[in-house]
């Protein structure tokens, strides 16, 4: 991509648009940070100063993808090139996830994870023991129905906030 002196896109190639699922009009005039996952926006400042990095981005379909990028500034313009590294990041995650699950199963605490959209992907054995729910019984509703009705509004509001911001969900009932 080609960015102006203010850091806004002025030109992007068709592969970039296809990767994001966007039209050129959706991108031109925006800054790369506008397309980044909210959780990566602050951490990318140092990478931008260095001229290279890897960040998560949200596509039009609101899926998360990783882009490794390099840029160089010349004569008031910044030239940027990126490469989709989503599959490499997912492979790294899966490898680390195997160790995580072993540790989570050994813990006496309740542990659960979700995907980027907030859909539960894992509950440890202790979670099932505590709730009395059988594995596979949750279906589409996730863990929401195990929250006490008096706590559900607060839990739902906080859950929506953290899934959109990328912050850590932490709530005591």
Image: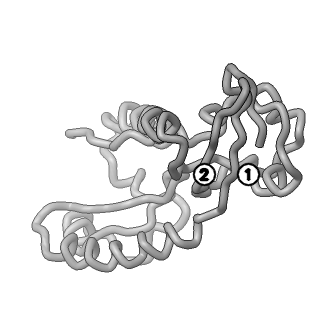
Left or right of residue 1: residue 93? left
Q: Are the residues tagged 2 and 1 within 8 Å (C-beta)?
A: no
Using a 10 Å C-alpha cutoff, classify the residue at mark 1 as few (fewer than 14 neighbours), some (14 to 19) or many (20 or more). few
Q: Residues within 10 Å of mark 2 (few under 14, many from 20)?
A: some
Q: Secondary structure at mark 1?
A: loop
Kindly indicate the quadrant of the structure image that contains residue 75.
top right
Q: Position of residue 44 (x, y in %)?
A: 47, 38
Distance of mark 2 from mark 1, alpha carbons?
21 Å
Point out the tag, 2 or 1, that comes first from the N-terminus. Answer: 1
Residue 160: in sight, yes or no?
A: no
Q: Is residue 143 above or below residue 132?
A: above
Residue 62 seen by the camera: yes
11, 138: nearer the viewer: 11
The relative height of residue 62 versus residue 150 in the rendered view (above or below) is: below
For the C terminus, which image quadrant? Answer: top left
Q: Residue at x 63, y 43 (%)?
A: 71
Q: Secondary structure at mark 2?
A: strand
The image position of residue 93, as x and y in percent, is: 42, 70
The N terminus: image quadrant:
top right
Choose between 18 and 141: the one closer to the eye.
18
Give the residue pinned by disc 1: 61
Which residue in the structure is indicated by mark 2? 69
Which residue is at a point 65% across and 34% down the rendered structure image?
Answer: 73
Residue 84 in picture, x, y percent from top left: 65, 62
Q: Residue furthest front?
A: 75
- Looking at the image, residue 121 sits to the left or right of residue 97; the answer is right
Give the residue at the far top of this rendering: 6
What percent of the width, then of the height, locates residue 5?
A: 70, 21
Please name the colour scheme applied to the rendered image.
one colour
């Amino acid at each position: 991509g080609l960015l102006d002196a203010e850091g806004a896109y002025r030109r992007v190639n068709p592969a970039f648009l296809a990767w994001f699922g966007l039209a050129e009009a959706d991108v031109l005039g925006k800054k790369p940070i506008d397309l980044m996952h909210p959780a990566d926006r602050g951490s990318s400042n140092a990478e931008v100063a260095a001229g290279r990095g890897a960040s998560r981005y949200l596509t039009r379909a609101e899926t998360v993808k990783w882009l490794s990028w390099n840029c160089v500034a010349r004569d008031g313009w910044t030239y940027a090139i990126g490469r989709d590294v989503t599959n490499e990041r997912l492979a790294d995650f899966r490898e680390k996830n195997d160790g995580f699950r072993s540790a989570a199963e050994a813990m006496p605490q309740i542990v659960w994870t979700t995907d980027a959209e907030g859909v539960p992907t894992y509950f440890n054995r202790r979670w099932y023991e505590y709730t009395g729910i059988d594995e596979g019984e949750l279906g589409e509703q996730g863990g929401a129905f195990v929250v006490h009705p008096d706590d559900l509004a607060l839990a739902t509001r906080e859950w929506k906030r953290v899934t959109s911001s990328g912050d850590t969900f932490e709530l005591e009932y």
